[in-house]
Amino acid sequence: MLVVAGLMAFAVGSALGAKPNIVFVLCDDLGYGDVHCLNPERGKIPTPGIDRLAKEGMTFTDAHSGSSVCSPTRYGLMTGRYSWRTRLQNGVVQGFDPCLIAADRPTVAGFLKGQGYHTGIVGKWHLDFQYRDPATGETLTRAKAKKQTTKKGKGLAPVGSKIPDGPVDRGFDYYHGFHHAGDMKAVIENDTVILHEDEINMLPRLTRKAVEYIDGRAAQAPDQPFFLYVPFGSPHAPIVPTQEWQGKSGLGEYGDFVMQTDAGVGAILDALDRNGLTENTLVIFSSDNGCSKAVGIPKLEAQGHFPSANLRGSKADCWDGGHRVPFLVRWPGKVEPGSTSDQTLCLTDFFATVADVTGAAVPAGSAEDSVSFLPALSGKPIVSTRAGVIHHSISGHFSYRMGKWKLILAKGSGGWTSPTEKQVDAGVPVAQLYDMEADIGETTNLYLSHPEVVDRLLKQMASDVNRGRSTDGPESHNDVAQIKLWKSGK
């Protein structure tokens, strides 16, 4: 079922006449319920910047990240392919290793660059890359970096280190940001570590650089479309709101940091307005997974703020609180303001969608798990050869969503929320089945009472996993020989 406040006629031909700028803002560990307009009754953090997108565009209420943790989601967003098809079968990457995106794997950025776009990323990469020692040119290990920088913690690549396989080698013309939370002190521009600074400066830096990018494109190349990817590192830990934001939320540092992140979104929207770019810019806002338990969810809930809204679980989990994410789309003249869609989509769908927007086919050997949601922007059904969406937890547990049904191949959360796989009571079913239309909170396990549904979803999921793609298309293969569906219970 699709609920839309006023359907619009959408002509693909008109969209192809002038290619729109595309801005994708991805927050880090922002829960579905952290966006006030999505959780007005149980959300206590003001988010006027993000709420503006909902007012001026479309809210998707059943959108999902490619995983319930960071790196896998970012891989899927950039490639249109589930990350568990690679060497990364669970967890996240740690840095100082070859890029998770293979050199010959098409990316959204590279694809758009081929369509005449200038491509920029301002923010967190978290897909691995290597560092070359600025003095010797040798590949740095984490241990070598720690010795050279004499920093506490894991160690940082020295200033001047070169990166041979980073974003500018995966389709981006420009990069300013950092690798991941543990390396946030190391600021990178294009292929070089340019300085070390305190983490508290990163969010203001990213906001400033994103605005500068928009101002620069408007001034230097007003006729060239651009793709700007802004993967903020917030409100992920370290939770470091600057002084001007401290105490603003009344909920502690996490609430303050969410508010400061929201202000960053607002600054980007203001930059588009100021440069006269709003009307021809497709803006998408989302998060890489749910809110992390590291922020003290019980304390927030005691204060009346529920980061997962009415969903069960949080970051790392198979339950929807781990991977159902905010997803807001604004495109003036194409998307009805204040509209809503309950069609299911995944962040892997970005690749096929931008291909649809530009009128170009996805490159061969790419976007195997990507479906265009462009029709949904005009209130039409998404046309898909993909039967369902595959979810994946931090521990590698699989779950499968097809229509109203969701099958979880885990006894508990499959992640960090209790009960974990080690905490479940003896004798519980080996898996879980939920009717997401009747039971969005995943409270009633129907696994034993609907064996025919379980069998149907399990067979389809196994097919989608084993054949190397979940959509119709040329034959494909996973990067690993065998992927284990059942991580526990069977």
Image (spheres, rainbow, N blue to C red):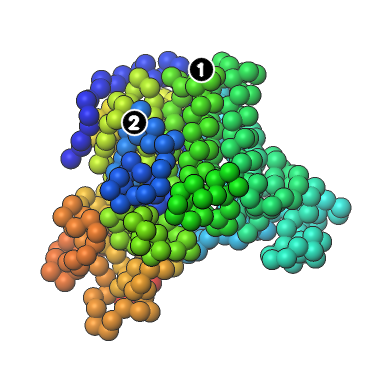
Kindly identify the residue that appears in the image at 65 percent across and 52 percent down: 199
**Image height check: is 198 above or below 374?**
below
Q: Is residue 407 left or right of residue 156?
A: left
User: In x, y percent, where is residue 37?
Assistant: 33, 41
Q: Amino acid at mark 2?
A: Lys
As measured in the structure, the alpha-carbon distance from the residue carrying label 1 to the one carrying label 2 is 19 Å
In-front residue for pair 373/328: 328
Kindly identify the residue that appears in the image at 38 percent across and 65 percent down: 298
Q: Amino acid at mark 1?
A: Gly
User: In x, y percent, where is residue 195?
Assistant: 76, 47
**Image height check: is 270 above or below 204?**
above
In-front residue for pair 268/282: 268
The answer, for residue 393, to whether it is visible in the render is no
Give the labeled residue for mark 1: 276
From the image, which quarter does the N terminus lie in? Answer: top left
Characterize the local packing of mark 1: few (<14), some (14-19) or many (20 or more) Cα atoms within 10 angstroms: few
Secondary structure beneath label 1? loop
**Image height check: is 137 above or below 6?**
below
In-front residue for pair 121/387: 121
**Image height check: is 169 above or below 323?**
above
User: Where, by quadrant of the figure, is residue 230 drawn?
Assistant: top right
- Numbered circle sitting on residue 55: 2
User: In x, y percent, where is residue 253?
Assistant: 51, 55
The answer, for residue 412, to whether it is visible in the render is yes
